[in-house]
Image: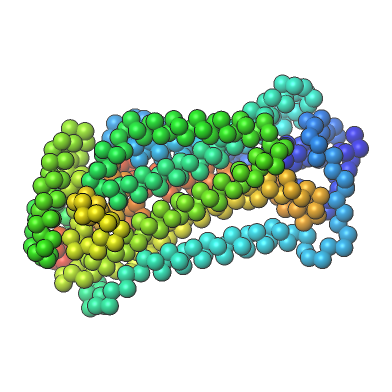
Amino acid sequence: ENISDFSLNITDCTQVVVPEEVFFTVAAAGILENLLVLIAVVRNKNLHLPMYFFICSLAISDMLGSLYKTLENIFIILCKMGYLTRRGDFEKKLDDAMDSMFILSLLGSIFSLLAIAADRYITIFYALRYHNIMTLRRALVILAIIWTFCAGSSIAIALFSYEAATVIPFTILFPLMMFFILCLYVHMFLLARSHAKKIASLPTSTVHQRTNMKGAITLTIFLGVFLCCWAPFVLHILLARFCPHNPYCACYMSIFHVNGTLIMCNAIIDPMIFAFRSPELRSTFKKMFCCAR
Amino acid sequence: MSALRLISNRTSQQALSNSDYTWEYEYYEYGPVSFEGLKAHKYSIVIGFWVGLAVFVIFMFFVLTLLTKTGAPHQDNAEPSEKRFRMNSFVADFGRPLESERVFSRQIAEESQSLFHFCINEVEHLDKAKKSQKGPGLESNTHFQEVPRSSGMFEEDLNCPTKFNIPNFVNTEQNSSLGEDDLLISEPPIILESKSVMQSSHRILD
């Protein structure tokens, strides 16, 4: 009991609380949007392609992230209202399951982004052999492997989360993947630049610099959004593991709920920058909504 | 993830009189964190982190912009055609990519012409083989806008497929399989047209 009293006096950095309405709205929007993407891909036969399957995988991870946050909040509300005991084994297991869902979502997002980047890389650099390299079946196998690995890792990390040995690889994986994805895209950009140079050297053609500027903007948005939405939380995990008593760390950890909301915002933004870029998918959406009315 | 539980339990604690600290984890039993004698602002990690992140993203953006500058010296005289190129993709005759590529191939150096034609043929074969799979056809053909004088900067072998790899944003959007029309950029793809088609589109735009 003393601890709860302490927790109120313990820090001058009080928890920054995000209103529950905002929380649930953001979470619901994320879940709905990604669900729409999934439905659109399933319903339109033209979208049964490796690229869209990877985008679906990203949508599923985003949905899981938002779902986790929603469930956690519902859980806390239920505890507040007294429907769930706080000491039970069942609640502990439920909590473990939810934590592993969250890690699954994070790992799934990272690997889905990696798969999307690799798919685009193959599209560009092995254009003619793309259909042989990336068949539907291979794409599904790759997705199965990714999700099995993520599920296994998430359960392992959730069970052994108190070990430093799990926190460190988890936080190293994050920047490593980002760096790798960045390298893939940079390589694609370099090819685009050389191609643009060739076009520019033709007598009757030219290329405007703005073309490439837009590419830089798009790629910065891709990676910037992912970084800004997930990195705060990853830093939180690191700080909670290694310096929980430090006042600076404690102040950072007090904005935990804002970090959680950022992750859900990522779930909302991701479909916009990946899925809705495709004209085919947009037209499928329009058809869906027009038919619904 | 006990950190999660730790913090979320603390939040709920502020609303409850009873606490959830029974989800025991060792470091839940923190000693009080003393806030005396802080040299820097107490939110310094938060501020430092976000500033660092913003700086990194901006730096990445500038690096990417620098990387993608074409840097071709004689580019200035033909500047406004970029818009025409964009419109080209709208007015392009999507049904004749092969023809336009054949026409285009006349403008290129002879040493690559044969390779180019060879690749066109190969693509035609590939295309026929794959036509049943795809809705919008001729998707492989649409890759073919790479100037065959390409440096081959990234491909060491002279394999036809690898030599003529092209970034998506110069493909025609014929098919969904190859990705969005704007893989890397958000504008419609630029198509290299035959001269006649370009002239007609110039007329449309001007």
The quarter in which the N terminus of chain A is drawn is top right
Image spot of residue B127 (x, y percent): 16, 41
The quarter in which the C terminus of chain A is drawn is top left
> What residue is shown at x 28% (from left), y 74% (from top)?
B72
> What residue is shown at x 78% (from left), y 48% (from top)?
A244
> What residue is shown at x 25% (from left), y 60% (from top)?
B152
Image spot of residue A89 (x, y percent): 75, 21
Image spot of residue A203 (x, y percent): 16, 72
Horizontal arrangement in the rendering, residue B157 relative to residue A292 (left or right): left
- Which of the two residues, A289 or A150, is positioned nearer the viewer here? A150
Image spot of residue A137 (x, y percent): 33, 30
Tell me if residue B99 comes above or below residue A72 in the rendering.
below
Q: Quadrant of residue A96?
A: top right
Horizontal arrangement in the rendering, residue A194 relative to residue B197 (left or right): right
> What residue is shown at x 55% (from left), y 62% (from top)?
B56
Q: Quadrant of residue B85?
A: bottom left
Q: Is residue B85 visible?
A: no
- Which of the two residues, A115 or B156, is positioned nearer the viewer here? B156
Q: Is residue A124 visible?
A: yes
Horizontal arrangement in the rendering, residue B17 relative to residue B206 (left or right): right
Q: Quadrant of residue A131?
A: top left
Task: Report the number of numbered marks.
Answer: 0
Tell me if residue A286 comes above or below residue A141 in the rendering.
below
Q: How is the image coloured?
A: rainbow
